[in-house]
Image (cartoon, rainbow, N blue to C red):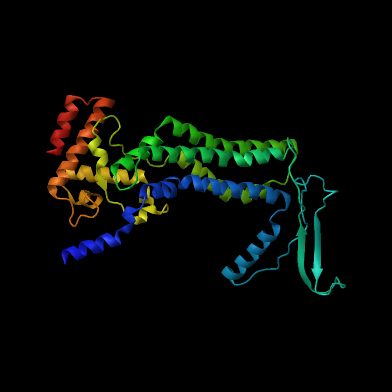
Amino acid sequence: MKRANSLTKKLLSWWHYLPTAWIHFVVVECSAVWAALGSWVVLIGQIQTTTSIGNVVQDVAQKYFISLFFLGFTGEQSALFSGVKDPYFIDDPEETPIKWFATYQDKDDCTSQLKQCTLVLPATSLKFLSANFVWLLLAWALPFTAALLVFYKLFCLARSGIWSFETLAYLEFTEHMYASMQYKVMSALMAVSPIGLIVLWVAQIVIFQLSNQLDALIASIPALGVLIIAIKTICIPWVRGQRFHEHGDIHEVLSLRVKRPIMHINPANASAHNAIWSLNIMRALLLAKLGRYDVMKEYMFVDWDADEEMSDEECRRVVSICESALTKDAVAVGAPSDSDSSTDESFLR
């Protein structure tokens, strides 16, 4: 029976054989990059669409139905179909004009029921070194720097040789990478594009005396907010994780195993990020140092397919390994004074 239970457990734990470190790294640790890319594409499109066509019809219809279905009644609303407000994006409006026409139930009677209104935007292209061509360069600036950053992160992961996200080595790897100068420089490059967007937008408003940009700004606020939060998370993470092997030479600490559920592949899970999980491990180590091993048995293990939890003796061995590594890091940064050491020992006792 015990052997059958062990076999069932292995079958249910099939995902342990997957390259979980790679999956987690791309989906969770790079989630801020994907959020920045998505919001950037929406932002560029929203600015140009609102500037050239506007969103009057959508705004009027939204207010109409919100009032109707939340208050139970609504007043009369009307929208002006004015076509394209500014044909700035067309190379030659006379050669390739913008078409706007209505289709009626009776084609020969314009007073019959209106079937639809059609706006035809012609095929066009951006001229090299034109005012609009700058937007093309700016639009690709952030995707290019994001690609460089993701390539660097994946290259570092491949060079590390880490396969599973259930090792302390994986937590140590991400914290080491985020602290590297290369990562800081590449993440700073991603922040240049939003700054360039604001500078270009304001410059064109002043140069071309554009007075209809308020609607575009209001419509862009949601995407702009997501972009700012994502860039901030990339450049300055909200939480700084704990490093266990920063200055020491105890490689045994990197082979320690940590328990992580499959739900850690979900980027919406706040505890799925390595910085948060490393702090959970640090909390487990502190409690184990004080004699509580239950938290460590919840977060760490010797082998993922073991039938039993870590023993108290194994917990003490893990605490000893981590304590040695952290002590060497503390000595490398700055040796604690004798008074501080005696105070810490008396507290632990």
Give the percent coordinates (x, y) of residue 287.
Answer: 20, 45
Which image quarter: residue 133? top right
Q: Quick one: quadrant of the C terminus? A: top left
Residue, far right: 108
Q: Residue at x 38, y 42 (%)?
A: 239
Location of residue 3 with respect to 165 vertically, above or below: below
Q: Residue at x 42, y 54 (%)?
A: 268
Give the percent coordinates (x, y) of residue 220.
Answer: 61, 49
Instruction: Answer whether residue 52 is visible to the viewer in this image.
Output: yes
Instruction: Answer whether residue 261 is visible to the viewer in this image.
Output: no
Give the percent coordinates (x, y) of residue 183.
Answer: 45, 34
Q: Residue at x 49, y 36 (%)?
A: 187
Q: How many marks?
A: 0
User: Viewer-proximal residue, 230 or 173?
Assistant: 173
Location of residue 347 with respect to 338 vertically, above or below: below
Location of residue 157 with respect to 2 vertically, above or below: above
Q: Using residue 162 as the reference point, say whether residue 209 is left or right of it.
A: right
Give the percent coordinates (x, y) of residue 323.
Answer: 20, 36
User: Viewer-proximal residue, 63 or 27?
Assistant: 27
User: Viewer-proximal residue, 38 or 340?
Assistant: 38
Q: Using residue 2 as the reference point, say whether residue 24 is left or right of it.
A: right
User: Viewer-proximal residue, 138 or 335?
Assistant: 138
Q: Using residue 167 as the reference point, say whether residue 151 is left or right of it.
A: right
Q: Quick one: quadrant of the N terminus? A: bottom left
Q: Residue at x 56, y 42 (%)?
A: 143
